[in-house]
Image: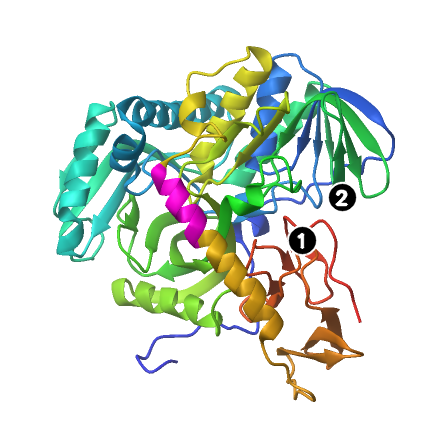
Amino acid sequence: MNQHGFAKFPFVTSPESFWIASTPKSDYPTLNEDMQVDVAIIGGGMVGISSAYLLSEEGLKVAVLEADRILLGTTAHTTAKLTSQHGLIYDQIKRQMGPEKARQYAEANETAIKFVAHLIAEKKIECDFSWQSAYVYTQSDDYIQKLQDEQAVAAELGIKAFYQTELAIPIPIKGALRFDDQVQFHPRKYLLTLAKMIEEKGNKIFEQSRVVDLQGEGPYSVFTRNGKKVTARSVIMASHYPCHNFPGLYFTRLYTERAYAVVAKAKESFPGGMYINAETPTRSLRSLPTEDGERILIVGEKHKTGHGQNLTQHYQNLMDFAQELFTVEEFSYRWSTQDCTSMDDIPYIGQMTSDRPNLYIASGFRKWGMTNSTVSGMILRDLIVQGESPWQEVYHPSRFTSSSAVNFIVQNADVGINFISGKLKSIEDTPSVEPGEAKVTDVKGHRAGVYKDYHNEFHIVDTTCTHMGCEVQWNDAEHSWDCPCHGSRFTVDGKIVEGPAMKELETL
């Protein structure tokens, strides 16, 4: 029990995503021979699987290359809200990019919701689908006008958007914006079904097939770690964070943030709806149907990857929040997630650079990957099959806005500061490391991260990130080494958890 009398989560357990725990593991083969396809897709998350399904329906030959197992990354650590309500985005787009771009963004995301809903109904996919209203609320007077402005713009764009001053959940608010006809679902149940349909069309999904190189200017050769290659006329980079550094220099145009989730069992019934606040710290809530009955999913506490200390406190903050609202009987799951954000908050979807025909990217979804991943699949299908998409302009990866220019300077200055400070940070000569702890020290002349597991075994890695040379930082909440510059993450043995790094940390 903590000082408020609230039950703590048993942190001796490892984080576990409900979406993974409640679905079977996939078991697709590794790429073991060279092959040729129409489209090679790097990454087996929601973008990769959605794109592969849509392209398969067009009769194209497709291969998906996944470094681990499909649908285990950000897709499996989401809030799983299929919504066009992405914070206060529509007024922002209208002001920065004009009403036509705002219309494209709204139409794309509303279409994505309808597409997924129709596909689930048509194919009879069991994935805990339910229509919900989505709310963004505020407890601050500073956001009332912003919510009202957002409501006005959203309504102009054809979204069913309404302003109100009360919520069904027990939170006192100043105001709230409601979007009707939104969706919550189980993303892995939905996408694992799509993966089976992709194979039924004669197309291929390869797991444990990490891409390490991309060569050519069309057709392209995509090489995996074991030396096998896929030759393709078109390539989609759907690896969450681009794993190929130089076309478009996306490592200078994206930054990563982590957020946390806990699942609570409460005595009270959840009143329905999906909720998120407008201010920080972020608090997001929705119901979660399980085989053991209804639970409540609480998400929030975002921060830049590789930044901060005592990260387990983020879980405790969410649990304290839940217990202030509900009579919580237990916390059954906890996990964290990582999201990429573009410089102007709009994803990059489309041709990666103007001089690389048929090389495409989908990244930078911020916290709204369920709809934008589906939008990605539809845009990329249209670009590959027809050469154009009705929504390509707002998502165009080569766009430039005044806000993106300012944020570019801020974010890359932060990268430089972290690169230098990581090199200069003092290290302990003979650190005392307790089980479950990690410290940075000198080992044989190398800056090293030393972790002691609960069996008193040591795991030692070189702390220099293999992506761009920044120094990784210890994440005590997930027991990983995280890069503060571009968001790569590694296990205690140096294996890659998150890209863009394509090489493991060196073990010492």
Estimate the spatial distance between the alpha carbons at disc 2 and disc 1, rounded to whole Å.
Answer: 20 Å
Image point (52%, 50%), residue name: 77
Badge 1 density bin: few <14, some 14–19, many ≥20, Cα 10 Å: many
Task: Tell me where residue 255 appears, x and y as whole percent.
Answer: 49, 50
Q: Position of residue 466 (x, y in %)?
A: 70, 56
Main secondary structure along the magenta-highlighted residues: helix
Mark 2 nearby-residue class (10 Å; few <14, some 14–19, many ≥20): some
Amino acid carrying mark 1 in the image: His
Q: Report whether 179 appears left or right of 195.
A: left
Residues marked 2 and 1 touching at CB (< 8 Å): no
Q: Which residue is mark 2?
A: 208
Q: Residue at x 47, y 57 (%)?
A: 413
Query: In the rendered structure, does residue 408 fall within the stretch colored magenta?
Result: yes
The residue type indicated by label 2 comes to: Gln
Asked if residue 136 lies left or right of residue 360, the reply is left
> Which element type, helix, strand or loop, lies under badge 2?
loop
| Residue 186 percent across, percent down from the top left | 48, 40
Judge depth for marks 2 and 1 and give the one in front: 1
In terms of secondary structure, where does tag 1 sit? loop
Q: Which residue in the structure is indicated by mark 1?
A: 467
Q: Earlier in the sequence, mark 2 or mark 1?
A: 2
Query: 41 or 233, which is in the foreground?
Result: 233
Residues drawn in magenta: 402-410
Q: Quadrant of the N terminus?
A: bottom left
Residue 137 falls left or right of residue 388: left
Residue 505 sits in quarter: bottom right
